Every structure is written in C-alpha cells, then in structure tokens.
Amino acid sequence: MGWLDGLAWLLCGLLVLVVVRSLLVRTGAERVPLHGRFHAAREWLEGNGYQVVRVRERAEWLGYYDDREFRKPLVADFIVRKGSRYYAVKLVSPRDPGVSGARLRDQWYPLWTAFDVSGILHIDLDSEQVHIIDFELKRPRYLHWRTVLNRGLWLISGVVITYAWLYRG
C-alpha cells in the first residue's frame, strides 16, 4: 500500500467522521435572555430531563405560485433533546385559540418538518400541562419502492466501485 492509498483512506475516514458527527451532534445552545414565562419554561424543561439545545430558533416557509411568493416565519420557543429525540417547544400564549385540525396543519406541521424533530411539546405554564404533538406521514407504496430501488442502486454502485478499486491490476 503506497502513500497515496494511505492518504485516500485518511481522507475517507475524515469524511465519514464529519458526516457522522453532523448527523448525531447538535450544539450551540444560544444564550438569549429569558424573562418571565420563558425562564419558567426553561426551568421546567431542564427539571424534567430535557436539554435545551436552542432558544427562539427561526426558520422560514417559502411557497411559490407562478411568480408570486408567499412567506411564513416559523419560530420554535425552544429546541430540546431528551435521550436521542429532539422536540420543538411552543409555549401557550394568552391569545391561544385552542386546538383544531387547521392549526395542526398550518402551524405545527411546518414546525415539525422545518426543524426535523420527533414531535412538538405544547406547554401551558398556567395550567401546568404539557401536550405532545406528533405526526405520521403515510406515503404511497410506489414512493417506498422507489426509495428502496434508489438506495439499492447506490449500494450496488459502491460495491462495484470498491471491487474495481481493490482489484485494479
């Protein structure tokens, strides 16, 4: 094995390390001053075994219809972790209209999708209640088989390239 092969193995190992680390480790809990109900919510979360990862995390939903653009800001009060699961946290506001199918669809589903979390914790500090909002997306069967075929082709390609690389002479 020459020095080029060793360098290639080292680069591949570093690439795998970077990818695995980016998938498993989320850091950077921001230090945002918390007053009133945010402070109480953070204390409750930490007291119940949740690790606060981000505070007032923002994303944006963009939609296009021909040349018209539609925007909606998405804000999670906290992003927390418990074990290997991440949750977006929304605190109940005094003007909260309650739960409805439209609210699940229009407000909480985009949060679940944008922040790629396991669920949403809806915390009502006044009545000391926590509601877990979760979603399940049932896709058509053809999408499942298309994904399996795509991943299988990538696997076969990797095996062929590895075989060609190892037995090239």
Image (spheres, rainbow, N blue to C red):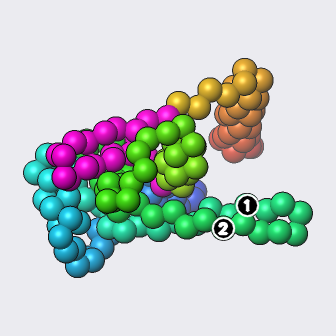
Q: Is residue 124 above or below residue 40?
A: above
62 vs 90, left or right, is: right
Numbered disc 2: secondary structure: strand
Amino acid bearing label 2:
Arg
* Mark 1 crowd level (few <14, some 14–19, many ≥20, 10 Å Cα): few
CB atoms of marks 2 and 1 within 8 Å: yes
Could you tell me residue 34's position as x and y percent? 21, 73
Span of residues in magenta: 115-135
Count of labels shown? 2
Q: Residue at x 14, y 53 (%)?
A: 44
Kindly identify which numbered label has been placed on residue 63: 1
Kindly identify which numbered label has been placed on residue 71: 2
* Mark 2 crowd level (few <14, some 14–19, many ≥20, 10 Å Cα): few
158 vs 95, left or right, is: right
Amino acid bearing label 1:
Gly
46 vs 135, left or right, is: left
75 vs 31, left or right, is: right
